[in-house]
Amino acid sequence: MIDNLLSLEPFSLHESEKRPVFLRAMHEAILFHYNNCENYRNFCKKRGFDPAGEFSAHDIPFLPVDVFKDVKLISVPAKDIHKTVHSSSTTTGTPSSVYLDETSMSRQTRTLNSIISNFIGEERRDFIFIDSPSTIKSVVGELSSRATTMRGLLPFGRKSFFALNDKLEPDEEALGKALDELGGPPAIYGFTYMIYEFAKSDPRIRKRLAKKTKGCIVLHSGGWKKLTELQVKKEQFNREVSDFFSTSPGNVIDMYGMVEHMGVIYPDCPCGFKHVPVYSDVLIRDVNSFELVADGKPGFIQLLSPIPHSYPGISIISADIGAVMGSDDCKCGRLGKYFVFKHRAEKSERRGCGDTLGE
Amino acid sequence: MNKESDDIEEIVTKLRNQIEFIHGLKISDIIDFLDTLGRHWARDKEVGGAAGQSARYLAGFLKPENLETMLDTALRKKEALDGFVRLNSRNVVYHAQPRGLVVHWIAGNVPILGFISILQALLTKNVSLVKASSKAYAEFLVLLRSFSKINTGKIQGADLSKTIGAVLVDSNDRENQEKLSLAADVRIAWGGQAAMESIMNLPKKITAEDLIYGPKYSYAVVGKECLGGNTRDTAYRLAIDASVFDQYGCSSPHTVFVEQGGKVTTLEFADELAKQLDLVNRRLIPKGKTDPKKAMDILTLRSKYEFVGHVFSSKNTDWTVIYSDEEGLAVPCFSRVVFVRPIKDIHKVKDYNDRHKQTMGIAVADKRRYDFVDKATLFGVDRCPALGKMSFFESPWDGMFALDRMVRWVTTCK
């Protein structure tokens, strides 16, 4: 069932057509993790969830993403783990860790290819990564989320270049070489705040880039936390970054995703929405009761996908706030559900004399 | 009462001009005024709307018998505030003079406790300047303004209110923070670690007295002899302690150690505590608003302990009981999340106590209570009230008789 699902075009089914196909795949995934991950089985039992029974997507218990920071969750023998991927841990300082086997990685490659191709076309382009070449290297099977995303994009690159040195400063020599070798408008990828910092760098770089990157596509991901702190809004970001790379703001594409929800990313369509492919589902839950909210209402974003094989991250909920905006009727033509990411739920609680020290 | 922060010197001068006025009042008249004020707060809709449950809490605090006991305990004789009194010396008489201007830095978590220090300053005939929390400033002003509605014949509230000023000063406004600090004869600060360090680093008069409240951790201990027929009552009282202030007070319990070997198992106690938290939430102290980040923290904690322990919780994020066999004090989550941990012998908690621990609520039989409390508090913990009374303000607080620290003792020969 899962293989059948992953062979579909990402935005090819109406929501009503997708639902039963997706649910069958989820059924297979849940049974697998229930039978192979004791922690997950206990979790389901304590939530009173029986994966052998009838259920809908919204009945599937969800794991908060931060659980992956504290608990090692694996559904395959340890010897089958090929890679461990860590999140960027910008909020708490502790990264999430997810453990990938061959099956998970193979599924991830298939689905990412399908989704990215849908947005930037199947024709291979030259890629400029606003990052350092050392980031992408795996250290004893460990990868950062930045490295994982870049590796996912490599198959789309005719040639790949890196614009920063190991100190994450602009590497003018490498950049010059890249510009000399570019065979057309490239695709550019970087973490959101790194792209922004790069666009704020030496104006000479902008001049050098102007002719060569004209009309390029700029993909970015990794979250808005740092830019929110700088009070930089998405419109301003798109304007400044597109200006820097001499392309249109519509070619600056924000991709939403997270390490724990491997294999699926949610790029912005030209209408500003994030589309849910057939490989996943997005539900929005009330921030206090965790009940589903109506379309258009904001709440926590729950992500479901049968792709993870080596860890039970098939239904997770994050502290990101979003809203489902509709289904099947986006002007961009993609079918299925679409949503918007609004912001991260930030701490606003009272602090004071009970603000105790950690034990 | 003023709120502009750009004329702190002017506010300080005005307040200092009120010292002789308040010094001339009799303590019995002040107590009478505060009693009337407390009764007004208990029934006034505006105060009730601003302070919620805390209005009744403050009204209880302001009862004459409570104030008189507090003053007599801290100062030996409350009349020492009015003039010279005999204490234990044959040759000397004593008088408690106000120190002058008390500057209060009030925390945003439980502004009510901060208000108590203002009332204590007033009881010791000091004038007060309050650096209020921006989050609770509106509520704070409602309480302050209500002074003007009281007239006892001996004291007009409008006059007494002139002895208290309030300002909003940003924590990063170093210049005005320094002005506040340098003006103070007593500095009282309620708050977290960062706020305390920031205030302590401000310049101050050499003669200034400091009363620092926080940051502190509190917890509870249930002896095995209390796990029998009265388990429900014990759990109910603990549920109240965890629900008042939604655990954001320094006296709120986060962990409860339950001694093994009782008629009720430690896990059964956790289950009963869950039932009582639910009851208290529905009938007595409804949970305040939970911000989304905290809701996600609670959900994450619940999920984590569903792997390694037992979780009892409301369907939403109103309350949570987490039972595990872990040792030591749990990292607090706040927002009505109580960690229940079994313990073989309650004397073990001594190892967890240091000066950062404040209140240890106890349900321990009388016959071993004093010995247990004496040994457990050698290196830390200042209060060991019965369960259900952890969040009741009492003097001393944080190990200090604040009323005594707000006066200067003057002696003369008989």
Image (tube, coloured by chain):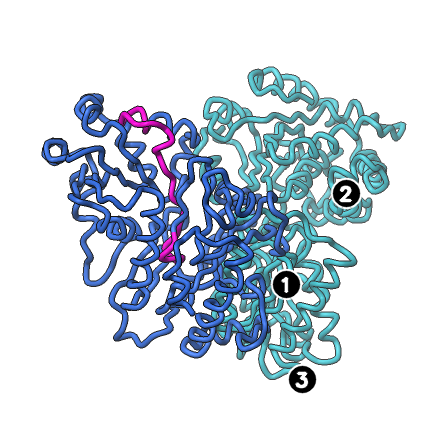
Chain colours: A blue, B cyan
Q: Is residue A241 visible?
A: yes
The residue pinned by badge 2 equals B55
Q: What's drawn in magenta, residue-wise? A: A241-264
Q: x, y (%) of residue B255?
A: 56, 64
Mark 3 on the same chain as mark 1: yes
Amino acid type at image mark 3:
Lys
Contact between marks 3 and 1 (CB within 8 A): the answer is: no
**Toward the viewer: A211 or A317?**
A211
Amino acid type at image mark 2:
Ala
Q: Please give left or right for residue B107 compared with residue A180 in the image.
A: right
Find the distance from the CA under tag 2 to the CA under tag 1.
24 Å
A103 up-or-down from B292: above or below: below
Q: Please give left or right for residue A169 compared with residue B413 in the image.
A: left
**In the structure shown, which secondary structural element does the residue marked by tag 3 occupy?**
loop
Contact between marks 2 and 3 (CB within 8 A): the answer is: no
Mark sitting on residue A32:
none
The residue pinned by badge 3 equals B263
